[in-house]
Amino acid sequence: MTPELSVIVPTYNRSAVLARCIDALCRQTCDKAVFEIIVSDDGSQDDTAAVVEALAQRQPVAIRYLHQPNAGANRARNRAIGMARGRLLLLINDDTIAVPGMVAEHLAEHARHPQTHVAVLGRMTVSPEIAVSRLAPLHLDRAFVGLRDGAVLDWRAFFTCNVSVKKALLERGGLFEERMRYHEDLELAWRLSAHGLQVVYRASALGWHHHFLDEDEFLSIAAREALSLHTWAQLAPAARPMLASLGYEPAARGARRWRRRLLAIAVNRRTEAPWRWLARSLPPRPAPFRQMSLAIYDQLYQSRKRAALRRLQHRDT
């Protein structure tokens, strides 16, 4: 029986959480024959291959394993998409832990919306099994704030932590841009929007994010985001006005330019340590203290991102 849906899981050196991810997929309430799992290994040096092989031997779901030399998650995703047998593709991360009905919810939503251009976004939030990071509201949770269940959204809601799409749409609009290591989902979705992409949000297609985001990791993402925005702008100059909404404004003018200069004096790598200490020291309650802490972290992140964009701009001039 050819599976209806292929779950695409790129991974790299995270065998423990990958095992949780696969185990959760194998506990889905839907018929196990209607989907397959494709684990695409981006050159892991741990025991990922052995873990996947052991799970494949004892689980009722078809599990396929691909391995490549380390080349990035996007190449791993693209290889898996090329091997997928399902007409539907469910794109998740190796730390996405599906609740038992997640796959069924994606399948049901596509049955309600059979049009090729309609994708389905499931909800993601921090796993109850791990400590809640105070930075979660600035990262994954921020993407889902204000989304209404059943809403039809545009390409900006295409997040590869838990999104399903018709394979035929990717065959029309292209695959993931392998030169990008951040915002690759949005870059793909932006191209798919030319083919009419719409995203239906289904909150009951829930996945738990089994990853604790610490302070150092959060701030380190800024440089990666800056590089990806810069790469995107180079690859698609027509996208530059739109990229301003994602923070790509290397040449701000007027009042915004002066505001940035003042912020750069107050918040920069030399002043970062005391700001981090203050943000870390503020208690989570009452709410105003929590909001102040988040505002400081957000400014620290944006400061790093703007500095990285300036360096990239100077490099190319």
Image: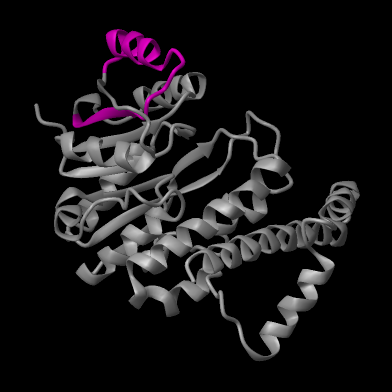
197 relative position to 269: left or right: left
Asked whether 54 falls inside the magenta stretch, the response is yes
Residue 34 percent location from the top left of the image? 20, 31
Could you tell me which residue is drawn at 63 percent across and 33 percent down? 128
168 relative position to 161: left or right: left
Residue 74 visible from this viewpoint: yes
Q: Nearer the viewer, residue 13 or 306?
A: 306
Residue 296 percent location from the top left of the image? 79, 60
Question: In the rendered image, which quarter contains the N terminus?
Answer: top left
80 relative position to 134: left or right: left
Vertical arrangement, residue 1 with respect to residue 103, above or below = above
Residue 140 percent location from the top left of the image? 56, 50
Q: Nearer the viewer, residue 277 or 153?
A: 277
Q: Residue 125 lies in what quarter of the image?
A: top right
Could you tell me which residue is drawn at 55 percent across and 75 percent down? 249
Asked whether 90 falls inside the magenta stretch, the response is no
Q: Nearer the viewer, residue 110 or 277?
A: 277
Residue 151 visible from this viewpoint: no
Q: Work out which residue is located at the far left of the displayed protein and give it.
A: 1
Could you tell me which residue is drawn at 53 percent across and 56 percent down? 225
Could you tell me which residue is drawn at 65 percent across and 63 percent down? 307
Q: Nearer the viewer, residue 242 or 201?
A: 242
Q: Work out which residue is located at the far bottom of the displayed protein and give it.
A: 254
- Number of disc labels: 0
Magenta stretch: give its range: 34-60
